[in-house]
């Protein structure tokens, strides 16, 4: 998280008009900076093999990421709050104004309404977060899932067909064939080529996700962003954006370690086919796992406030 970014307001906090508007404005500035490159390219129809993933695989629209939500248990004072946060997910409440001590009306998340509509999603996210957090990180995959996604494909069949392979088709296939592949994440495994699937030591399914996901997996770490925005507006926007930033950073490693030659986009490859590249990958993977566990705990705390055990 940016050191200048305010921490999300704690449940039970009452924010006066100027306080929550400052938080909202800071959030807008932060997200605008993160989205500037993508929006510039989108307006011009320019594809990007690394960053587009955050807006195509993940379904949270830029405008939704930009909108600020305070999270559960936070009361926003002032008539503007009731106008800005109306409708399905917010309700009005009366609290003591911290400045005057007098009763004041504000807007706050309607937790009961949210749970009535999204309670099953909260339960699933909690079970997945707890399962992943309980396991040690496995750091020996070396990003081979991206290689398995192009194994034995013709150049025109590649997802990023306009980007060359660093080692060519034959060299890429040799890397797959000379390594042990142990991908545990279903949403990576499902994109393996038919020839690569039998080479994976695991056969993940959607039903086994909570059983197999683990904190060292780059895709499980990126998916913290998905679980955070799936619970919008109950998750504070500062936390959703922290998860987005982590997903962005992880995606860069994911593609730098992939078989694609992304030098024309300014990315230096992590050559996982070499011992030095493997060490570089594992070090980055470990750091991301640690960041992910901290965000996983913060997301779990939000869920605990929504639905105490």
Image (cartoon, rainbow, N blue to C red):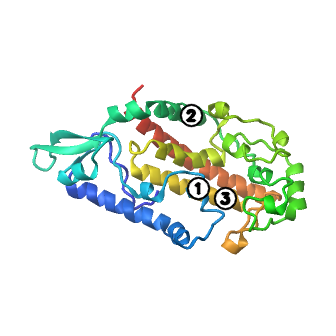
Numbered disc 1: secondary structure: helix
Q: Quadrant of the C terminus?
A: top left
Numbered disc 2: secondary structure: helix
Residue 292 x, y percent position in the rendering: 56, 47
Residue 282 x, y percent position in the rendering: 71, 52
Residue 80 x, y percent position in the rendering: 21, 54
Circle 3 Cα neighbour tier, 10 Å, few/some/many (<14 / 14–19 / ≥20):
many
Q: Which residue is mark 3?
A: 253
Whether label 3 touches label 1, CB < 8 Å: no
Residue, far top: 309
Numbered disc 3: secondary structure: helix
**What residue sits 60% from the left and 36% below the top?**
132
Residue 244 x, y percent position in the rendering: 51, 54
Circle 2 Cα neighbour tier, 10 Å, few/some/many (<14 / 14–19 / ≥20):
many
Circle 1 Cα neighbour tier, 10 Å, few/some/many (<14 / 14–19 / ≥20):
few
| Measured Cα–Cα span from mark 3 to mark 2 | 24 Å
Q: Indicate whether 189 appears above or below 41.
A: above
- The dot on residue 56 is 1
Mark 1 or mark 2, whichever is nearer to me: 1
Which residue occupies the foreground of this view, 270 or 105? Answer: 105
Whether label 1 touches label 2, CB < 8 Å: no
Q: Indicate whether 43 appears above or below 184.
A: below
| Measured Cα–Cα span from mark 3 to mark 1 | 18 Å
Evaluate whether residue 79 shows in this view: yes
Q: Indicate whether 130 appears above or below 96.
A: above
Evaluate whether residue 142 shows in this view: no
Nearest to N terminus: mark 3 or mark 2: 2
Residue 250: which quarter of the image? bottom right
Q: Which residue is mark 2?
A: 128
């Amino acid at each position: 998280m940016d050191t200048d970014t305010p921490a999300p307001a704690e449940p039970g906090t009452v924010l006066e008009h100027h306080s929550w508007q400052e938080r909202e404005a800071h959030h807008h500035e932060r997200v605008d900076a993160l989205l500037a490159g993508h929006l510039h390219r989108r307006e011009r129809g320019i594809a990007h093999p690394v960053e587009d993933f955050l807006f195509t695989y993940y379904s949270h629209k830029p405008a939704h990421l930009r909108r600020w939500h305070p999270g559960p248990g936070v009361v926003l004072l002032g008539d503007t709050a009731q106008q800005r946060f109306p409708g399905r997910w917010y309700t009005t409440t009366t609290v003591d104004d911290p400045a005057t001590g007098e009763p004041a009306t504000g807007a706050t998340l309607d937790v009961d309404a949210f749970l009535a509509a999204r309670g099953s999603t909260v339960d699933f996210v909690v079970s997945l977060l707890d399962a992943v957090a309980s396991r040690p990180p496995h750091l020996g995959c070396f990003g081979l899932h991206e290689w398995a996604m192009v194994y034995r494909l013709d150049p025109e069949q590649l997802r990023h067909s306009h980007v060359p392979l660093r080692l060519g088709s034959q060299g890429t296939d040799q890397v797959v064939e000379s390594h042990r592949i142990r991908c545990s994440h279903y949403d990576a495994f499902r994109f393996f080529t038919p020839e690569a699937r039998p080479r994976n030591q695991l056969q993940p399914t959607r039903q086994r996700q909570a059983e197999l996901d683990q904190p060292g997996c780059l895709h499980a770490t990126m998916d913290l962003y998905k679980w955070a925005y799936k619970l919008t507006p109950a998750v504070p926007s500062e936390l959703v954006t922290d998860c987005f930033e982590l997903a962005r950073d992880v995606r860069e490693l994911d593609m730098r370690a992939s078989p694609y030659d992304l030098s024309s986009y300014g990315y230096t490859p992590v050559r996982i086919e070499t011992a030095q590249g493997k060490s570089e990958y594992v070090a980055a993977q470990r750091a991301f796992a640690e960041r992910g566990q901290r965000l996983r705990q913060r997301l779990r705390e939000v869920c605990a406030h929504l639905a105490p055990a």
